[in-house]
Image (tube, helix red, strand yellow):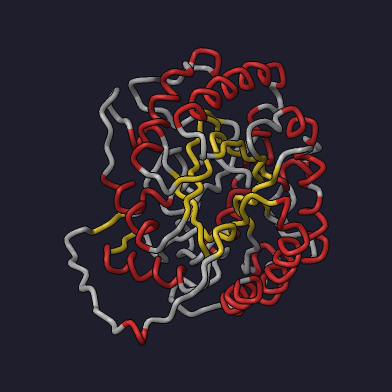
Amino acid sequence: MNKKTLGVVVGIAVIISIVITVLIIPSSEIITIQANEKIGLVINSPNQSVTLQELDQIYSQASNTGIGRSNVYLFWNLVEPVREEYDWKQSDTLMSLNNKNNFKVTLYFSIINGETLGPFPSWIGKPPLNSLGEDRVVRVLDAILSRYDIIDTLIISGETESQFRYHEQNIPVYKELFNAVYDKIKAKHPDVKIGNAFALHNVLNKNLQHIVSDLAIGDFVAFSYSPVDILNEIVKTPQQAKKDLQQVFDLAGDKKVGIFEISWSTSDFVEGSDSTQTEFLEKSFEFYTENESKLEFFTWYRQYDRPEGTCVIVEPGIGKDNGPLTTSGSGFGSSEYVIERLSKYICNAGLINNDGTAKSSWNEFKKQIEMIN
């Protein structure tokens, strides 16, 4: 979705002083749930602060649905704040929870984040794409992938269409950078699949299909999707939204497709509701079932709602558990009117209310995965 800021699941404030008691359950009482590595969920806490024990329970709750994947949003300025000195504290916590629950991970790294680049570490500054340096990118990605072998898919750039909407002359520069990074990373980590992500609703609303086609490179083409117009209001029926999804295959050409984040808000402020979210979730799984062989992964955005006013921040950065949805643009598209609707949409896009009560879509989510598995 269009945005000015990235909220990050990686930035969850974890209180690590909590000791988690591991209960020993007789093997005869353990219920084994078959996991589907193609189906994922953006796992998040319902509040800005969370203890390690609470986070462990949130991951366990997600695992019990039968998903086999999650997204991790790990940005360069978080992992390498000082040149060649890595800070793994936050990512180790999240990756250990993913590993504990046997999740594969789709890593979102963010060389491009919509209209902005990065966020990059301060020691890099704010370089243009043509002077970013492939070797620096390869070095940090190699460090991450070498540390976490549960990462099987890597998204280097998100909302890529917005970066080149008014700067199509820079597409060849980015392709050269991407291809150089791709070749060197594949030589070191041949089993990791690499691609870029695009916001399908932006592409359709702003007629940017040609940019996706130009940048259908790598192992797959990933898409986020929200059923909104340029004002961030829901304007599609669930059936119309399913038809939108079908267009990803024409856009991706001969590449596989990854559904990176798919969502529907229940906020009536943006014309959403519990019932339409549930209906669209059912339609989206119909889409998955009909096209499973063409899909690399299929990840729903997201587990929990967040309190009002916590889902869009003013400055780019890390440390807010919003997921990757941001807002960018110029003129009316970036006005307070649009940002307010974006915030309402995101804060109410979860399958569970932030007070812990499940929406009807949560039960539908579990039901659909059970039917597939």
Q: How many marks?
A: 0
For the view shown, which residue lies furthest in the bottom direction?
29
Give the percent coordinates (x, y) of residue 238.
Answer: 77, 66
Quarter-of-image position of residue 285: bottom right
Residue at position x 53%, y 43% from top? 153
Q: Quadrant of the C terminus?
A: bottom right
Residue at position x 64%, y 44% from top? 222
Quarter-of-image position of residue 300: bottom right
Please give left or right for residue 58 compared with residue 373 in the image: left
Please give left or right for residue 10 compared with residue 129 in the image: left
Residue at position x 72%, y 21% from top? 168
Q: Nearer the viewer, residue 69 or 126?
A: 69
Quarter-of-image position of residue 264: bottom right
Please give left or right for residue 126 compared with residue 330 in the image: left
Classify 271 as above or below 72: below
Give the percent coordinates (x, y) of residue 145.
Answer: 41, 38
Q: Nearer the viewer, residue 333 or 179?
A: 179
Residue at position x 70%, y 16% from top? 169
For the view shown, which residue lies furthest in the front direction?
28
Q: Nearer the viewer, residue 228 or 181?
A: 181
Classify 62 as above or below 170: below
Give the percent coordinates (x, y) of residue 163.
Answer: 63, 29
